[in-house]
Amino acid sequence: MRKQSSAFAVSVFLLAGCQSGDLANLSTFGDSAVSNDDLSKVAYYPDDELLQLAKVQFKERNYGQAYAIYKRAVEVYPKDPVAWIGYSASADMIGRFDNADIGYKRLARMIPNRPEYLNNVGYSYMLRGNLVSARRYFLKAYDIDPNNQTTANNLELLRNSTSFANRG
């Protein structure tokens, strides 16, 4: 019995030593552990943890989760343009253009001449297949900040979009 318990203790010690910082941060599905935090039932957010979690979900391409969290964020922070940009962008990515438009209308009153806003609206139009409107918004963003890398990337995406046949 004594021999079994010491063997067990040694194996537990060895297994505990195998866990690295990289592996400990992964969830069962391959996303980072923080992307599995559920903050939907929390009533008070002492800082921007809700927005940070939404950004993690968006970055990891969990657009449905990001949309749900950003939806909560615009309820908690109704005057925060970061919450509205994330809400609108995640709505775009799941094809909820009606909700994206609500967010973009709100942002038009908050930050109408910011490249972030103009790029997002342009990208939304590009996702919908309205390349003329997309180009108009991208060019407005370019006029404001010609060195903006996102605008340059969006204009390149737009150029590539026009070279392929519409199969929609």
Image (cartoon, rainbow, N blue to C red):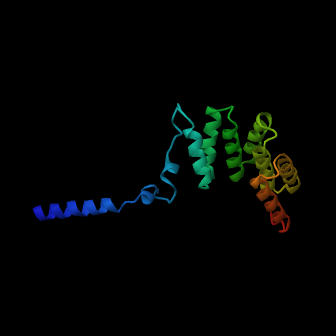
Residue 103 location (% of width, % of height): 74, 40
Q: Quadrant of the C terminus?
A: bottom right
Left or right: residue 70 compared with residue 149: left
Left or right: residue 35 compared with residue 5: right
Pick out the residue farthest to the bottom: 164
Residue 166 versus residue 70 in the image, above or below: below
Quadrant housing residue 19 = bottom left
Residue 136 seen anywhere in this rendered image of the structure: yes
Q: How many marks?
A: 0
In percent of the image, x 78 and y 42: which residue is there?
114
Pick out the residue farthest to the front: 147
Residue 98 location (% of width, % of height): 76, 44
Residue 2 location (% of width, % of height): 10, 61
Quadrant housing residue 20 = bottom left
Residue 132 location (% of width, % of height): 89, 54
Q: Quadrant of the N terminus?
A: bottom left
In percent of the image, x 79 and y 34: which residue is there?
109
Residue 65 seen anywhere in this rendered image of the structure: no
In percent of the image, x 21 and y 60: which residue is there?
9
Left or right: residue 121 compared with residue 37: right
In percent of the image, x 81 and y 38: which residue is there?
112
